[in-house]
Amino acid sequence: MNFMETSLSLSNPDVKLNIKQKLGLAAAGIGTLILLLSVFGGQLPYPWLISGGSIGLMALGGLLYTNGSYGAHPEGVKNNGIWHNTISNRGAWGWIIGVVLTVFYCILYWAPGVLGLGADGAANRGLIALFDPLSQLLKNQPASQWFVYGTLYTVAIFVMGFKFIMKYRHNRY
């Protein structure tokens, strides 16, 4: 391969996504966008619909993407190219996601008011208010920053568990 055939793009131009992967990324992206809009948008209308839609779209997107990635693959370990991926090999995307998650946790721990936690009995707003309907259903009280964290963590574990099952479904262990 000569220099003229080498791609100089930051992303991998050889990645081909199937329709399930594209739909999964779109659904997860829309769910994440709704979540981010709630951080900056204050009080959103129809909290049940927006809350359920956001969490549901993120989970559905992850499940669709995983099914598209591993659903039709034959038996065997599927670690193809994992060390060439920038998200798993100390690349730019891995660093960006690591910094974003660390900043989110620091805000959650030391400045929950930024995410909309109501102080001294005030109503929640923003991101935390988005989780109030689910918290009212489960605990009969408004959401806290730790309820938000626990819900997002539970959805992530559910989606990653599904990915693990799909990826290693042919392995008896």
Image: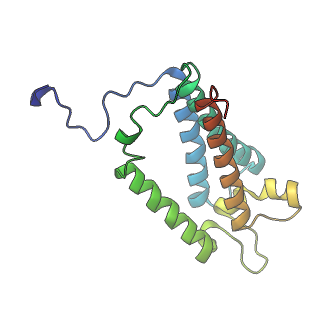
Residue at the farthest bottom position? 120
Give me the residue at 64% from left, 28% from top. 169
The residue lying toward the viewer, choosing from 17 and 121, is 17
Give the percent coordinates (x, y) of residue 29.
54, 41
Q: Is residue 23 above or below residue 102?
A: above
Give the percent coordinates (x, y) of residue 126.
64, 61
Number of numbered markers: 0
Q: In screen coordinates, is 165 left or right of 90?
A: right
Say if residue 88 shows up in the picture: yes
Identify the colour scheme used: rainbow
Q: Is residue 67 above or below residue 33?
A: above
Give the percent coordinates (x, y) of residue 120.
76, 81
Say if residue 111 shows up in the picture: no
The residue lying toward the viewer, choosing from 66 and 148, is 66
Corner quadrant of residue 129: bottom right
Q: Is residue 141 above or below residue 72?
A: below
Give me the residue at 44% from left, 62% from top. 99
Q: Locate the C terminus by quadrant.
A: top right
Corner quadrant of residue 153: bottom right
Give the percent coordinates (x, y) of residue 76.
53, 25
Residue at the farthest right position? 140
The residue lying toward the viewer, choosing from 73 and 155, is 73
Give me the residue at 81% from left, 58% from top. 135
Q: Locate the N terminus by quadrant.
A: top left
